[in-house]
Amino acid sequence: MAYPYVSEHEVRILSKYFGDPKQRHLDTYVERGGYSALKKGFDSGSAEVIETVKASGLRGRGGAGFPTGLKWSFMPKDTGKPHYLLCNADESEPGTFKDRELMRWDPHQLIEGCLIGAFAIQAQHVYIYCRGEFFETNQVLARAVEDAYAKGYIGKDILGSGNDIDVTVHQGAGAYICGEETGLMNSLEGRRGQPRVKPPFPAAVGAFGMPSTINNVETLSIIPHIIQNGGAWYRQYGTEKSPGTKLFCVSGHVNKPGNYELPLGFPLMKLIDEVCGGVRDGNALKAVIPGGSSVPIITAEEAGRCNLDYEGCVEVGTMLGCASVIVMDEHADIVKQVRRMVDFYAHESCGQCTPCREGSSWTAQILRRIEDGRGTEGDLDTLMEMTQQMVGTTICVLSDSVAAPVQSSIEKFRDEYLALIRRGERVGAA
Amino acid sequence: MAELIKLTIDGHDVAVPRGTTILEAAKTIGAEVPHYCYHPGMSSPAMCRLCLVDVEGAPKPMPGCVTTVMEGQTVHTQSEKARKNRQGVLEFYLVNHPLDCPICDMSGECNLQDYVHDEGREQGRGREPKRVFGRDDFGGDVLFYGDRCVMCTRCVRFMSEVEQDHRLTVVERGDRSIIDTFFDEGLDGTNWHGNIVDICPVGALVSKDFLHKARAWDLEHTPSVCTSCSQGCNIDLHTRDNLVQRIKPRENLDVNAWWMCDHGRHNYEWMNHGDRIEAPLVREDSGSRAVDWKSSLSSILARAGELGNQPVKAVASPFSSNEDLGALAQLVGALGGGETTFRSSRAEAEVPLKGFPTLVRRRDLAPNRNGAELIGFKRVGNDDGFGGLDKVAEHDGILIVLGDALVDQTPDFGSKASLYIYLGTHDSPAARNAHLVLPVTTHAEHEGTFTNHEGRVQRFWPALQPPGMARPAWLVLGALVGELTERSGPRKATDAFSSLSGAVSAFGGITYDDIGTRGAVVNESVSLTGD
């Protein structure tokens, strides 16, 4: 079976059953060893679960790469209040399509991870906040949750352990900002999906004002494997600081785009050339955005030096983000691509903070003018200066995400901007 | 007493209670950190990003409105980093702002204008077409100019947190965000919505009543007290050309904080009436004759001397100041004593401001009912402020009316009185039989005090020139008392008040200096009957 594309370089743990529709069924999942990690976790106790996850070195897969075990340990113990585990399934970063696959091919893997996570942080309720546009995914998840309830994997006294955990799938309404953790909480509570001011942090005051932890789909999906096999097992993959495997969503000008599960630290060029079958039509590589649209763009030369782990990306001046590799060949029009990304952020800005609300759309307007051949060189200085004003000055990091592609592209592809400005015409054909 | 936290702001050592925000702490050294969304009376969303300050050791600039002080912290509000941030944020505000200051009501008192003038860029860099929302009628007294809005959401939060009637919201997102009402419901029927015009930092929310009436810089502001009920909201009277143009609440956390009700806010036209009595009038068979003050007072004294000690009945108004009422009570005493009464209207129900429960539009629809009662006046009549004067109308001794327009009385009122003195702002049919009609000033025209529902004595100051020869009642009555008791009458309001505090124990020991602009509570516990 060849889920769209597979590669011999892959280490398929999370994605083992991608492309196999039977895996969605609870019976198949259990037959293949599912829900045994849950029992093991229950038997070992919540402190031991957290220790195992800490030992694995697992880092959050939503983009920030914060150590998951440490995050769980921040949750207060025995507060007498309800605790919540929130699963962030509002995957909407341009270029990212891993969580959707995890949920639609292997929903029980996620549910099992959610249950173990909830047990670890003493939460009685898990909310899976799923992106609104994922209609099929929402249905698959809802069906899986229903089945798991029916077989006693969710609900009261799970597997006779005495643990009560409920799981609710919440369908979002299609706003990127609801993928920001506190925006998600507001949306879940029925408010406007706007990020909250931190502090207080979610571990103290989260969903419904109660202690909450929020994890990405991919993070929670790997949990059953870590509990089953131990932290040391997980560390055999990846690097010292970025252990484990990671799903890479490759899109753009490659011959075989798709999801590939690779150990962290995998060289970027090897991913493009060997895993993805090279750049389309044998064209030269121009640029790569390795972590989703909100991280700085890198040149082909930088891509050659880039290893795909959290540290390796920082070394070449970008970030791993959620490992959404967008590849652009020599025909890509950088200005147009950047403008499209900024348009996206301008459209998705929640509108609270002034620098983001006004800055993102202003940036888009200037870029559009440059694209149309009506720009000036002064515009580039204005763009650099005003986007700098959008970094670190807002409640959440959406406005930083506008600045990253604009600043990095002006620094690295200034010639393309200047060519448009000077000739009033576009380079490239994309 | 909360624990004090010591920190340094702009090089000054500051000690403030734990939990104080940097923005509030900075105020203690007189450093005003520019801000829009923060308002001390509401929650802080920290979204305008203008109050970001530079905290040493912090990786990012911190919002001063929500960041609480920490021991040993060093904060800079004027550093290069802080100023550059404000300049940048202000530029963002101007990207879509219409800059229609010449036709904007807020011009001259606009925070955007002020901040940009102080710290904005000399030249704008915006070349793109501006976003246009247009104008919307929000109902009530409020017009919304969406293009001027800085999206601070103070108005939304006032309606949801303070008035607690969710009439406003933000719709859409990103740069399409705009304040809106729910369908056509608007603000009609709410009682406190005028406050959202006050707290709007720019000209996005403007008052229909004040629209294009006056420029802010032409207005004089005079501290005063609202007379529309016994709450005694602290206000400023904004005047131009000797007319009150509008009323704005004046901050006093003990009384009304930053707020006032719409009824009180719009109840000012009466202060501008032109049909005033402008000179003392002597009634003669042939009609009224205007005389000067000296001869009018002499004629009263002469007539009183002729009559000797006759029982006095005095009717006052709860709109009169403590000084006026005190002088009237003393005059009644000097004439041999008698009955002092007043009438006042009471509303059927209170109108509380839910989010600030000590602020209520009170049932007593007059500013000084408590003062009148403390000074010994008895309330008569019904809740409409009518009736209760049957015996007074027929009184055959000395009759003095102060401020009560007697609109329910017949022209025969006081026809049997041996001496009938009417002190008022307007002539009244029931004053036809008055031997003397004396023009007095409104509270907007003289200095004095009212005693509010909780017994707080509060000062007001003259905002308007009195018409013609009208004088404060305390001055007129005090002069008569002075003549009768062979002492000098009060020359200033403060004299009139000290005379009152000497005579009425509830006011004992209180001085104008004690009262200041915040008020001082009387010595006795008071409660308005029937509350």
Image (cartoon, rainbow, N blue to C red):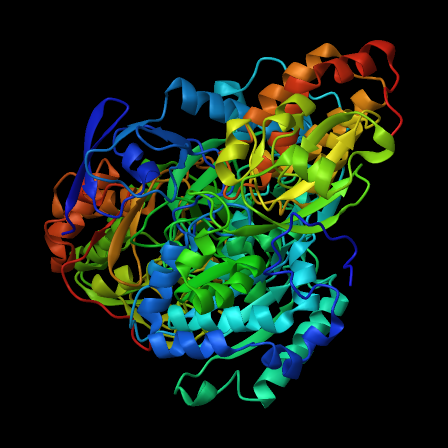
Vertical relation: B156 (above or below) A417: below
User: Which residue occupies 65% across, 40% down?
Assistant: B211
Residue B271 visible in image: yes
Left or right: residue B96 compared with residue B232: right
Q: Nearer the viewer, residue B238 or A277?
A: A277
Q: Nearer the viewer, residue A427 or B9?
A: A427
Vertical relation: A26 (above or below) B122: below
Task: Find residue B190 and report its horizontal and vertical position in percent.
Answer: 57, 63
User: Which residue occupies 21% across, 63% down?
Assistant: B374
Task: Find residue B492 and report its horizontal and vertical position in percent.
Answer: 24, 36
Task: Find residue A277 and report its horizontal and vertical position in percent.
Answer: 78, 40
Task: Find residue A371 and report its horizontal and vertical position in percent.
Answer: 82, 23
Left or right: residue B26 compared with residue B415: left
Q: Which quarter of the image is occupied by the C terminus of chain B? A: bottom left
Q: Nearer the viewer, residue B16 or A157?
A: A157
Q: Residue A404 is drawn in which quadrant?
A: top right
Left or right: residue B436 compared with residue B289: left
Vertical relation: A396 (above or below) A336: below
